[in-house]
Amino acid sequence: MNWETKRNLYMNIHHIIEQSISGLKSKQEPDYIAALVTHLPVPLSSVLNKALPNLKFKVGGCFIHQKPLTTFCDPKLSTKSPEIGDLLIIYKEIRSSGDVYNALLLQAKKATNIYKAVVSKTDYHQLLLYTKWPKFEYARAGALNGRIRSIQPKSITPGAQYLLIDDSGRSFPSPCGITTFWCAMPDNILVANNSLALQIIKLLEFQTGRPFDKKNNSRYLDHWSKMIWDLLNLSSVSCFNRRKAGYNNVSRQAGDAISLIINRNNDKCTEYQLPDEGGISIICIEGVVNERVDELNEIE
C-alpha cells in the first residue's frame, strides 16, 4: 500500500468511525462498542473496496453486552476475574497460497487524558492479564466455562491493547481532525500511540495485532490461536441463537465463525447476551486477494 493510498484510506476510515458514533445519547463504554460494531461494517467494506482494488472485502459485526471473564489459576495473583476484552477485530485474508489470520483484542477505557491514562489499582487484574498472561480458565463463557488457556509468551503483545475513548471534553486532534478512539499498549500509565483508524490499516498489513492459525486441528494450535477461535465460535453461537427471524440454533456448516458473522451482518445481531452464555463484540474483516490484479500491478 503506497503512502497516498494509505493517507486517503486513513482519512476515510477516520470519517466513518466518527460517523458511526454520531448522535449517541448515552456515552458509556458499551454504547461506543455497540455503535462501532453495528454501524461501521457496511461503510468500512465500501471504503476498503474502493481503496484497495486488489482485494475484495466483506465486513461484519456482532455486539454482545455480557462479556466472558477469566479466572486466574493462581489465586495469589488476584481473586478478581478480568474481562477478556470488549472488542475483537479480526482480519482474514484469503490467498491462493492459503488463508492468513490476524487479531486485535481491545479493552475499552474512557480517559480524560489519552496520553496519561492511569490504570487504577481496582483495574490491576485486567492489566495483569494483558501484561503477564497468567494461566486462566474461562468463566461466564457458556460451554467454555472451566476450560484452561495459557497464552505464550508471558508478556505484552500487540494483539491485546487498550482502546482509549477520549472523554476529555476538549479532544485531542489527529491529522484527520478530532479523534475519539485511540489505541495504547498495556502499561500502568496508558499512552495513546495510534488512532483506531490507523490500527485497522496496520491490522490489514499485519503490522499490529497478533496472527493466529487456521483451525485445522485444534489439538496443535497454540493457546493464543485457541483463545481467538474460542471467542469467535462462542460469540457466533451466542449471537445467532438469539435470532428473531428464524435463525435459532442455526447450523454452522456453511463456514467458520468469521464467515457466519460476515454473512449474517445484515441481520443486525445487537441484542443483549443471554444470562447463561458469554461472548465478545466482534468486527470481522475478510479480504480475498485478486491474484490477476496483483499480476498486472507487477507488470506496470
Image: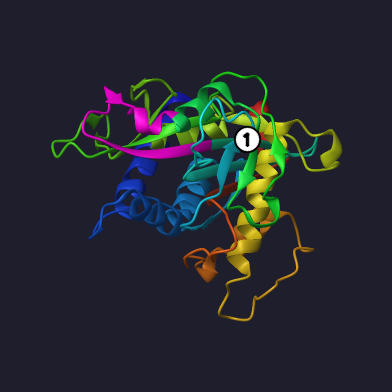
Residue 37 appears anywhere in the view: yes
Farthest-out residue, left: 170
Q: Residue at x 49, y 67 (%)?
A: 268
Q: Residue at x 53, y 43 (%)?
A: 89
The number of numbered discs placed on residues in the rendered structure image is 1
Query: In the visual, does 110 lie left or right of 138?
Result: left
Looking at the picture, how far across and down is residue 197, in whole percent? 40, 37
Residue 39 placement: quadrant:
bottom left
Residue 5 appears anywhere in the view: no
Query: In the visual, does 225 lie left or right of 90?
Result: right
Query: In the visual, does 253 lie left or right of 17?
Result: right
Within 10 Å of disc 1 (Cα), the crowding (few <14, some 14-19, many 20+) is many
Q: Residue at x 62, y 67 (%)?
A: 240
Farthest-out residue, front: 76
Residue 115 placement: quadrant:
top left
Residue on which disc 1 sits: 102
Q: Residue at x 66, y 76 (%)?
A: 248
User: Which span of residues is magenta-colored?
Assistant: 105-124
